[in-house]
Amino acid sequence: MDRRTRHRISRLYDGHLQRSYVTGKLAGDPVYAATAAIVTNRALPLLDIGCGIGLLGHYLDAQGFTQPYLGLDHDARKIRAGRLAAQRAGLDARMTLSHADVDLLPAMAGHVALLDVLHYLSAERQRALLNAAVRHLAPHGSLIIRNVLREPNWRFHATRAEEFLLRVSGWIPGGAQHYPSADELRAPLENAGLEVRMEPLWGRTPFNSYLIVARPHD
Ligand SMILES: C[S@@+](CC[C@H](N)C(=O)[O-])C[C@H]1O[C@@H](n2cnc3c(N)ncnc32)[C@H](O)[C@@H]1O
């Protein structure tokens, strides 16, 4: 994504801090491009669980994604900021942001994204959410997960330090609950009959992030 587009998207949000966050995320986080590469292959709506301020929706729009985008998040402030940004972009007909908990997913079938959300839930809620996410996949839909994995390496420790800061700064009230291992994510998805691909997605960060894509076998 070019600088001008990043700047345009950042100006949909209020305040210097939020705009800097948006520009930094769009410039430095490879997860949005990785998601775009998958969802633009198949014309299906996208359910973005734990969407935050809805940045993925704007990134995809800039990449030519024209399907409905439905984001949900339990943080009312983020949803308010996301709705305002969608209105300012003239995308509110296609981009819906809903204030809800992950336990209450809307009825729809398409692609499903779970970007940096799972570790804010207990192990039990993660299992329930993975199963619910799979039930929201269309026959050719992909489940795209980006998450930190629990591994004995320095990246994992750097991630925990960052999560501590996110919690004390109030950006993610409650903070991380459970860091899943690779097997904890792989097993329920494979048991649901999906093909699972897992690869590191560090970008220029020190964090132990992985991209996990689950889809029906061809
Ligand atoms: C690190 S942010 C990621 C935001 C977005 N997915 C992205 O990548 O730009 C994690 C998001 O998960 C949301 N979240 C955490 N627990 C949740 C829950 N139980 N129900 C809904 N949203 C939740 C938080 O409010 C936060 O916006």
Image (tube, rainbow, N blue to C red):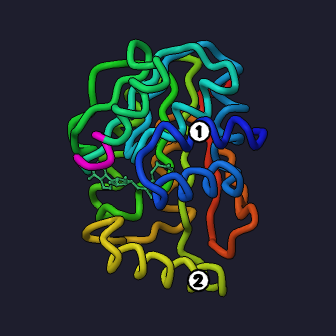
Q: Does the image show residue 37?
A: yes
Image-based side of 35 in relation to 50, left or right: right
| Quadrant of the snapshot with the C terminus | top right
192 falls in the magenta region: no
x, y percent for residue 21: 53, 58
The residue located at (28%, 60%) in the rendering is 124
The residue located at (71%, 40%) in the rendering is 33
Whether label 2 lies within 8 Å of ligand 1 gets the answer no
Instruction: Using the image, tell me which numbered label, if any, was put on residue 132.
Output: none
Image-based side of 209 in relation to 13, left or right: right
Q: Nearer the viewer, residue 18 or 207?
A: 18
State whether the magenta stretch is mostly helix, strand or loop: helix
Q: Quadrant of residue 106?
A: top left
Residue at the outermost right position: 2
Q: Does the image show residue 186?
A: no
x, y percent for residue 2: 78, 39
Tell me if residue 12 comes above or below residue 139 in the rendering: below
Instruction: Using the image, tell me which numbered label, if any, was put on residue 214.
Output: 1
Whether label 1 lies within 8 Å of ligand 1 gets the answer no
Q: Are there few (<14), some (14-19), or many (20+) residues within 10 Å of tag 1?
A: many
Badges 2 and 1: C-beta atoms under 8 Å apart? no
x, y percent for residue 94: 44, 15
Q: Quadrant of residue 13?
A: top left
Tell me if residue 64 comes above or below residue 119 in the rendering: above
x, y percent for residue 125: 28, 55
Calculate the distance from the C-alpha at mark 2 to the C-alpha at mark 1. 27 Å
Q: Nearer the viewer, mark 2 or mark 1?
A: 2
The residue located at (44%, 75%) in the rendering is 163
The residue indicated by pointer 2 is 158
Region rendered in magenta: 76-80
